[in-house]
Image (spheres, rainbow, N blue to C red):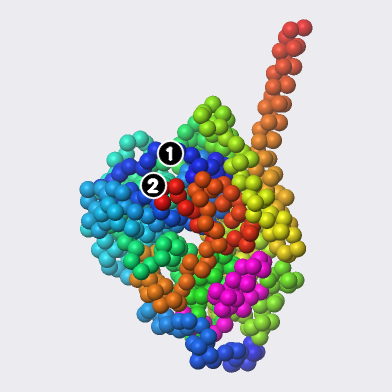
Amino acid sequence: MTYRPQKPPLPETPEQLRARIPGWGVDLDPADRPAVPQEVFDPGRYGARWEFPERQPELTPRERSIEHAFLTPVFGTVCPPKGLSGVVRRYAYRRFSEGRAAHWLLLVAADRIDVLESTAASYASRQPDNPVAETGVRAELTHHGIRSRVGRGRADVKHVWMDPVVVAGPWVAAGAGLAVGASAVLRRVGRRGT
Amino acid sequence: MVYRGPYRVRVEEKDRPRIEHPNDAIVRVTLAAICGSDLHLYHGLMPDTRVGMTFGHEFIGVVEEVGGSVQSLKPGDRVMVPFNISCGSCFYCARGMLANCHNVNPNATAVGGIYGYSHTTGGYDGGQAEFVRVPFADVGPTVIPDWMHDEDAVLLTDATATGYFGAQLGEIRQGDVVVVFGAGPVGLVAAQSAWLMGAGRVIVVDHLDYRLEKARTFAHAETVNFTEHDDVVVHLKRTTDHLGADVAIDAVGAEADGNLRQHVAAAKLKLQGGSAVALNWAIDSVRKGATISVMGAYGPIPNSVKFGDAMNKGLTLRMNQCPVARQWPRLFEHVRNGYLRPRDLVTHRIPLEHIAEGYHIFSSKLDECIKPLVVPNAA
């Protein structure tokens, strides 16, 4: 009991646990746990034959955290920044460290711009987006969408209605913005014509 | 597969990856998995997730091509690839912190390199694809032992290694009471691993009955469905004689349910780096002086975490991404001896061409999904 020195008794003895659970206690000794302690200085143990790796060529300018002293010797090259979202991403990396909220909020904003830009661009490509198919929502029909949720007391069912809003919301907002802008332009053109 | 925006993925033809560094390899993927942390990307929660990215940091395959300096692998080798990309020689790798490599991620210093994640982990395509570029082929990947099942191998590249690592970070001692928040694949393995380290009781908390059933059968654990209790912290105190657990493991991370305000602020509005419900329950439900291991993934934007309680209770909070390759030799023994059974977690095998449905099934927890694998066309 908490209010006295002894720890509360356990329901099973070590012998009972060993009999019931395969492998109970085989890693009881911390020496058998592979990442204990966390830091063990042993350069070369993991296959490196270099003290500093050969540098990967930087074929196009690569954005990097300003907390790094230089571009890391190896880096990913997929999906380089592009369009307006790319401008925002490059600014976020160039101007703000990882310690600044602005860095992350700009990257989140760039992600949303990227979605709008990329989806719009897809309609001029050979593989236009199919927003419904891409959500995989068809699985609701083939994998027990209703039975998986109803009567199961799932906590997430309370907010599942928000998911379509999260998916469609930016498009509705962008459409409304375009409609408002277009109607303002039309009104202005109409006034000039009279 | 490629990401097209929140809740949207599709199959697309991309250029085949090429050798970009002398220690690169190109691997033809034979089996991949969708991880719970892929869902954070899928839901648009992680900053700098770019349209066109290929997700997937759990994969195995066959080496197609190697760069000029690669010595440990050759074309034709069947390999398993850790989710971490590690140079093997930086300050951190030299000390065994293979998940914290400083030479592979120009986009951030706070996190190492990871395949198929947001660009904050380096901008590398992932393994939910036919081919993938594997940097530092001499450091990360290893040849799959002949005796090992492919489904065990693919789950050792993250979920199993991370679950075991979560228990390891808990610094479990004989007779400890261990509470695991989250009965997903990582939580289930963490619960199983807690026994290997001598736990006296293991209690798993979740809201999905079918996963709690798995916790009882797969991980031999006691279970708590938090939706059945007005206050799960009080319930956990009562079940531990009002002391609280000695160790708690957060295997939920950024999209935890159980508090609508936290969930909406984090998962829907993206106003914080994650819903800290499970972490706060862990802080409140353990005993004073306890250890909390954080395995759940959170984003870089600040979170509403109860550090005041953690300080007042004298808690030790331990956390890191798992250094997968460092865990492997011991985990291979455990799989071979039957102490860990990764492939028992697999519930779905999704053809790559049906990846959109696969993500929806896993995200929406349809069809009692626990762990979906992805089978590429090229396999």
Q: Amino acid at mark 1?
A: Lys
Residues indicated by labels 2 and 1 sit on the same polypeptide chain: yes
Instruction: Give the SS element for disc 1.
Output: loop
Which residue lies at the image location 59% right of the left edge and 71% below the top edge? B214
Instruction: Give the SS element for disc 2.
Output: strand
Query: Residue A177 location, x and y as percent?
Result: 69, 30
Asked if the stretch drawn in magenta spans residue B199, the answer is yes
Q: Is residue A14 left or right of residue A45?
A: right
Query: Residue B105 location, x and y as percent?
Result: 39, 50
Residue highlighted by disc 1: B14
Which numbered disc covers residue A165?
none
**In-front residue for pair B276/B181:** B181
Q: Is residue B88 left or right of residue B45?
A: left
Residue highlighted by disc 2: B131
Q: Is residue B162 left or right of residue A169?
A: left
Question: Cα distance, mark 2 to mark 1?
Answer: 10 Å
Q: Amino acid at mark 2?
A: Phe
Earlier residue among tags 2 and 1: 1
Subunit of label 2? B
Q: Which residues are magenta?
A: B196-224
Q: Is residue B188 visible?
A: yes
